[in-house]
Each structure stands twice: as C-alpha cells, then as structure tokens.
Amino acid sequence: MKSVLITILLALSLTLSFGQSSDKATVYIIRTSGLGAAVNFKYFVGDQFIGKTNYGKYFKLELDPGEYVIWAKAENRDYVHATVEAGKTYLIDAVPQMGAFKAGVNLKALNNPTEKEWKIINKYFEKRKLLEYDEEKRALEQRDYADIIIKGLDHYNNKVVMARDLQRLTTPVEL
C-alpha cells in the first residue's frame, strides 16, 4: 500500500498557475488567522515545493483531477489528502498553532464551511493578496528543501496515511 501510494504521488503531475481552467481543479490555501503572523509556512503538493507565506497572502493551485497529498511545514508538519475534480474549487485553511519555538501549522480541509467560516473566508479574499511565486525562486527552494520533502513524505507514508484524523479534502465549494 505504501509503495503504491508513493508511486502514485510521484506520477501525478502538478501544474501551478493563476488562471481558471475547466479541465483543472482549483485549490486555495488560505491562512485566516493572524496568530504567528510573521512565521512563514512552507507548502508542498506531494514532492513539489509550491511556496511559503506568512499571514495575509494565499495560494491558488490548479491541479489535474486526482488524488494529492497537500502538506505544510512549520515547526511541525501537517497533511491533507485531497481528491479533486476538474472544474471544481476547494479550500484549505492553514491554521497557526502554538509551538515550542515558533508557530506550528494545522491544515484544515474546508469541505463544508459553516456560515461563520464563510464570513471569515469572504472577508479574507476581499482583503488579502494572491501570492504569485517566482518560478526561478521556487526551483531554487525545491532543491534547498529536498531533505524536508524526503522526510515529510516518509513521515506521511509511514505514520499519517492510515491515521483516522488525517484531514481529507473531498467536497468542492462555490466561491
């Protein structure tokens, strides 16, 4: 099972773009809480580094339909198993948590946001900035974070993939 999942993850293609496409799924990674605002979280889709942000910015990912492990690294690591469909939009909130030395991260799959969550999400998109990450910088950081990626995916495959509390992103939202 673990080796099959690793093979699937490595075979999946990742396309990062900022346009809307009906043959791609759109996944937004937002950070609605200002706790630990200055601390950057590093984000990955499988073995691909997608960027890092602190509070006030968000990512928009365009992914081929399929299954992905979307994860973040701060003082800790956290994971979401995403199953996405073409033409659909999904939300993940990177929620800061208290850490021993700096903020940790807790990824929350927003499958069915409550009314209160929708108010926060809508206000967030009105005031915050889409992060357009420089591809050259991303490529350099991909190499810099090679050890983090190996350890992060190893941790996922050996300890997290079968956990009952693994966040699963499965339900699209209407923005």
Image (spheres, rainbow, N blue to C red):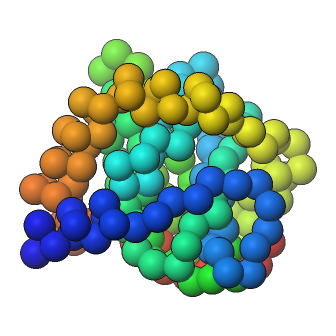
Horizontal arrangement in the rendering, residue 13 relative to residue 77 (left or right): right
Question: Residue reaching furthest top?
Answer: 101
Is 49 in front, or is 128? 49
Is 40 in front, or is 134? 134
Question: Residue reaching furthest right?
Answer: 126
Q: Is residue 17 visible?
A: yes
**Residue 16 x/y as whole percent:** 62, 54
Q: Is residue 98 visible?
A: no
**Residue 51 x/y as whole percent:** 55, 37
Is 39 placed above or below 118 here?
Answer: above
Residue at image x 30%, y 21%?
100
Count of marks, rendered view: 0
Residue at image x 21%, y 63%?
6
Residue at image x 64%, y 63%?
62
Quadrant housing residue 70: bottom left
Is 52 placed above or below 167 here?
Answer: above
Quadrant housing residue 103: top left
Residue at image x 82%, y 52%?
125
**Residue 143 x/y as whole percent:** 38, 28
Is 8 placed above or below 160 here?
Answer: below
Horizontal arrangement in the rendering, residue 44 relative to residue 36 (left or right): left
Quarter of the image for the C terminus: give it: bottom right
Quarter of the image for the N terminus: give it: bottom left
Is 57 in front, or is 108? 57
